[in-house]
Amino acid sequence: MEALRTTRGTRITIRVPIPARTNKKIAKAAAEYDRLGGEEAGTRAELAALDEQLQAADAKHVRAYADALAANRPEPPETERAKLEALKASQERRAAALPLALDEAEAALVAAIEGERETLLADTLARQAQARERARAAVTELATARADLMTERAISGWLSRFPQFAGRAPSAATPPVRELLGQNGDPIGFDVVLAALSADLESPKAASA
């Protein structure tokens, strides 16, 4: 299978969501895919570090050679570069092979996800339905609790100012949400907020198609 690519040709890293990883087939394939992806990143970092070490070794040798010339001695042996070059060559071979291994792991992961997709989709739709019902109940409770809160606030305000305004009954109006301002700068009505929350809980048409 050809590796998943962006429009620029770079590899797309598959981010398997946690619930899907509870599936044994996907978990096994994802673990191998993640392992190889980590090794590829580690190998790139190791190659960059080796390049820096080679530069440092060259600079160290030049300094040692300069000191030798100043003392009328022959060039000292270069002891570090050969070892570092061997390490770099080994890492370069590893870096060339890892993308091929990662392609195979990616193909296995894609196949596992596609093979289990219908089951996983049914599971997540069931969890969505459960969560939606909890959220609907929470919105209903929010509306009731805020109404009770506003009523008690009105009563406490009437009592704290008594006997001033004793002839006025505590307000039964539902105040807007003062921390949410509309485009005109006025606070948004609580009924509008509730309607928006309720609408937000329903599945978009595109997702339910």
Image: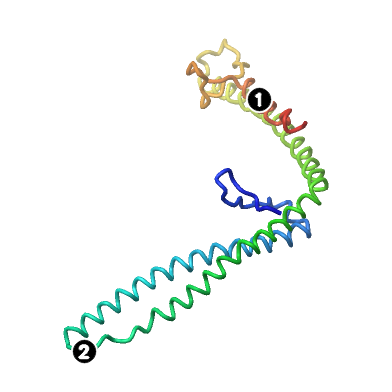
Relative image position of residue 170 (x, y in whole percent): 60, 16
Q: Position of residue 65 (x, y in %)?
A: 25, 81
Q: Which quadrant of the rendered structure holds the N terminus?
A: bottom right
Q: Amino acid at mark 1?
A: Leu
Counting residues from the start of the chain, the first of labels 1 and 2 encountered is 2
Q: Tell me, for residue 59, which label it has, or none.
A: none
Residue sitting at 73 percent across and 53 percent down?
110
For marks 1 and 2, give the one nearer the viewer.
2
- Identify which amino acid the numbered label 2 is placed on: Arg
Helix, strand or loop under label 2: loop
Instruction: Look at mark 1 in the image and give the residue it sits on.
Output: 194
Which is more toward the observer, 194 or 105? 105
Circle 1 SS class: helix
From the viewer's side, name the closer residue of 184 and 31.
31
Mark 1 nearby-residue class (10 Å; few <14, some 14–19, many ≥20): some
**Label 2 sits on residue:** 73
Q: Are marks 1 and 2 in contact (CB under 8 Å)?
A: no
Q: Which residue sits furthest bottom? A: 73
Where 81 falls versus 45 (above or below)?
below
Please say if 137 is above or below 181.
below
The picture quadrant where one finds residue 55 is bottom left
Q: State the residue in front, 151 or 35.
A: 35
Q: In the rendered view, how is the structure colored?
A: rainbow
Q: In screen coordinates, is 167 left or right of 209?
A: left
- Give the residue displayed 66% in from the left and 26% down from the top: 148
Residue 44 picture location, percent across and down? 50, 64
**Residue 40: percent from the left, percent from the top?**
57, 63
Mark 1 to mark 2 CA distance (whole Å): 87 Å
Q: Could you tell me which residue is drawn at 65 percent across and 50 percent down?
A: 4
